[in-house]
Amino acid sequence: METEAQSPKYIGRYVPQQDSTLKVTGTATYTFDVELPGMLYAKLVTSDRPHAKIVSIDTKESEQVPGVVAVATGKDFNFRIGIYVGDRDILAFDTVRWIGHPIAAVIAETLEAAEEGASKVHVEYEDLPAVFDPREALKPEAPLLHPKLGEYRVSPAFKPIPGTNIANRFKLQRGNVDRAFDECSVIIEDNFSMPYVAHAFMETQNCIGLYRRDGVIEVWSSLQSPFSARYLMAQSLDIPVNNVIIHNTFCGGGFGGKAGLGWEPLVAMLSKKAGHKPVKLILSRKEQFTSAAVREAFYAHVKAGFSKDGKFLAYKATFIMDCGGYGDYTVNVSRTAGYAADGSYDIENLDVESLAVYTNKVPTTAMRGFGYPEGHWVLEQIMDRAASKLGLDPVKIRLINLVRPGESSTGTGERVREDAGNPRKVLETIVKELGIGKEIDKPNEPWMVRARGFALNVKGPSQPPNASGSAIMKFNEDGSIDLLVGTGSFGQGTTTALCMIVAEEFGIPLEKVRVPFDRATDSEAYTWQTVGSRGLFVDGNATLSAIKDAKRRIVDVAKQVFRVPEEDVIISEGKVSVKGRPWLSIKLSDIAAAYTYPEGNAIGGPIIGAGYWTSVLNTYLNPETGQGIPSIFHTFGGTGVEILLNLLTGEIIVERAIQVEDVGRVINRLGVEQQMDGGLVMGMSVSLWEKMQFDQQGWLLNPNFTGYYLARFKDLPKEIKKVALETPQADGPLGARGVGEMVMISVGPAIANAIFNATGVMLNHEPMTPEAVWNALREQKSELLNEAIRGMKEHFRQTEEVMTKQ
Amino acid sequence: MARVITLTVNGRKRVANVEDNELLLDVLRDKLGVKSVKAACWRGECGLCSAILDGKAVKTCLILAVEAEGSEITTAEGISEDDKLSPIQNAFVEYGATQCGFCTPAFIVSAHSILQKNPEITEDEIKEKLSGVICRCGTYNQMLPAIKKASKEYRRSKSA
């Protein structure tokens, strides 16, 4: 990886993740591995109807199964939960809204007994008309999924429309698109879509609830955001927040699907029902696909207008997000896709409506990229198509329209700060590294096409304006440090990066700084959530603030020890010394727990530093126009790919890729590269192969890894180049910005653009499976297909000739 | 029917009382406390329950515990010698071949098994042979150089 030079001891270098030794030895403890004394197991009973009233639930036979302790139903939980719109029931109370909707939970001494018990719960339904397509669900005659929508608790930024299936409506309005379209010489109008996609984290959601006799609830859970889970749970149960303790173990992948609140309230209440014993729920893979939340499906109708010299003048878009049975978190995905519809471009006239719409399918939630992959899938293809119509190249059209930090404003009217990053340099880097404009080696087989394409990306965290984070650092007797932060550990490597910052700032070895692996909300510092690529930015700033606080305390003691003014005290290289008098120097360990004079008397005490960070710039968005300041930063980047397309089969092979992000400042280079490579693989997987396929009755046909293909080792491109640009952001931790999600946003459109550039075939719908590509080819460019077939015949005829001669 | 089986797990003789229909996966995890063996699909698709059984990497969710009677099983816990990490584990740490880490034990045992058999393995063969295990974090590009680096050590110990 290339980057600008620097010389600190840790920052910017390749540093192995601190938890990797436990991981490679199989000794990292995940919630999946946790067992508590007397632990019971729970199994869900789920709906086999897409939409129905529950007439009765008969649990008698189930309760007779040996080992079954209790059976819980919706009656045991007469409250709703949800982070932004409180539309979720924990177990269906009166209505089931999709096939897979949990109805009851059987608690038993063994998992086998719980499973048997679950098979003996009998549910009587009264079917209701169901709707599976959000565009149908918008029609006035469509069945209503949430007749009580108007009574749900809603966070201030969201607007459900009672009496409809609209869980949220977001509007972005800037300038006057209608007038602007009149001035356009090229207008592109089209429909795009993305299907339901599963997070498919390897550790399925699982958790243990322990409702203690003193009223305190402890939960061990495979989750991303212990503090939001704690808060939402306490709020739902109407108990003090500190009466909920969430244990934050290692987590086997999240990708957004373990943010907010999951199954934690269910296991807590099951524990109470089972006589305060710990109860563990482990979702099977099928339940993870059908009963938990996944990524929404996305439908877009857009109209984009450009002037004759390539200026993007007007963009009118309608986004419809199929949020399934509940919109809990997806309402914010729809809002984010709406306010970020303009991507990296300066578009004067915008009119975007973004809706989250209920249907009788699996519910949906946040997923890596959070509305940005959706918007970029559309916008980045429009750029290439407009360029082609205008006779410009894809680079030129972007240069004309890219936002200019310090001058432009985003679609929400936020000025793009001078230090926001360097989108132009991102583009130039892709051009150089991908070799855009250079000749492409033609494959030998006439039915194969090699092509290059690229797409840009930009993203910031989508969070409430007041979302904050904190950090506490405690010095130990030997000068080592325990760093307490609340950010989750699901593979992003943030905790190692935070420890690197601490080690660098004090000049001590990294081994002497550690974030504990087994954490809990009552003993770690608060952070709102670990989502939106905000972890390093928010918790990094909080850590720097804690470092500053600890240093102040050290200086307070040291100035007395040395009898010098505080401005003369220097902390570096693990030492505390006096400016200009190097002989006055003590080790950090001499002062970390209390400084002892040679006579034995002591001053000071154990040093603790505490800090926090909250954005003071963010605002709610105007409910009519979407204007305001939603993000704490924007990271600009992009992806370039060189692909091989088989015209006869529609198969795409990504041979070479280039990932570029302006991360502000590289903290752990290894961490940045892991994200860039991982995001590429996940981006390929989602855009090329992944689709949750529902039938006409709302059954999911592929709730497993045979029918739902995930990228495997053999799909790894031969060559991946990664470039981290470093345009530091003044209020970022040491200048850094987040990178975890950005890296997958532009992968899909880069591949689609490569195909468009080489063949003219437009791929509006993900995933770009061989079948989809081949069909598009046949419909849009059948001459290419015929040519490929002729080429193949000729190729084999020649081969045969050669063989016969021999 | 329940019966008693004997296994050698990571060099230690272990005895377990198992039902005929119990999976090796469940016996290892729940009865013998071998938690490095994970599960994510329970039907042979993801490879996360991989362990080395008599020298061969297998998916323990597809094997009944009674079928493993008398066999020798190695998991990620058993690959390191004494307190030292094995070459494949060291290389995984060095190259950052773990993200969430849930699949890591399966890749460690799978890579260890293929390198023991063929330390001359090529990049394409590594990709093909390890395609039975899924890493959703997509850490393949870190695992590849790690496995190549470790292969040198396996070559050395094979020729020694």
Image (cartoon, helix red, strand yellow):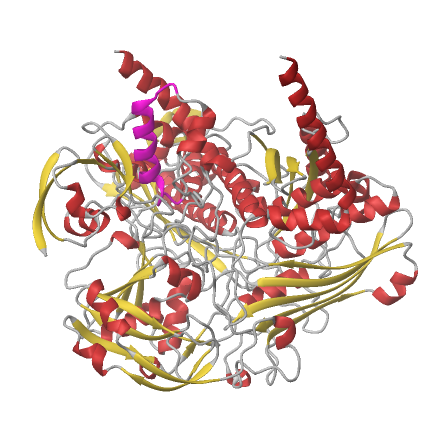
Q: Residue at x 73, y 39 (%)?
A: A424
- Left/right of residue A145 with respect to residue A299 in the rendered view: left
Q: Is residue A161 above or below residue A332?
A: below
Residue A641 showing in the rendered view: no
In this picture, residue A637 sits left or right of residue B123: right
| Magenta stretch contains residue B110 | yes
Looking at the rendering, the stretch of residues picked out in magenta corresponds to B100-120
Residue A546 seen in this snapshot: yes
Mostly what secondary structure, the magenta segment? helix
Q: Quadrant of the N terminus of chain A?
A: top right
Q: Nearer the viewer, residue A719 or A233?
A: A719
Quarter of the image with the C terminus of chain A in it: top right
B154 w.r.t. A297: above or below:
above
- Where does residue A399 sit, x and y in percent of width and height? 79, 41
In the orientation shown, which residue stands out farthest toward the bottom?
A55
Query: Residue at coordinates 53% horizontally, 77% vertically from top-left?
Result: A154
**Which of the 4 image quarters holds residue A132?**
bottom right
In the rendering, at what x and y percent does residue A377 appear?
Answer: 66, 52
Does residue A651 sit above or below A285 in this rendering?
Answer: above
Q: Where does the image place residue A228, in percent across and percent down from the top left?
A: 42, 64
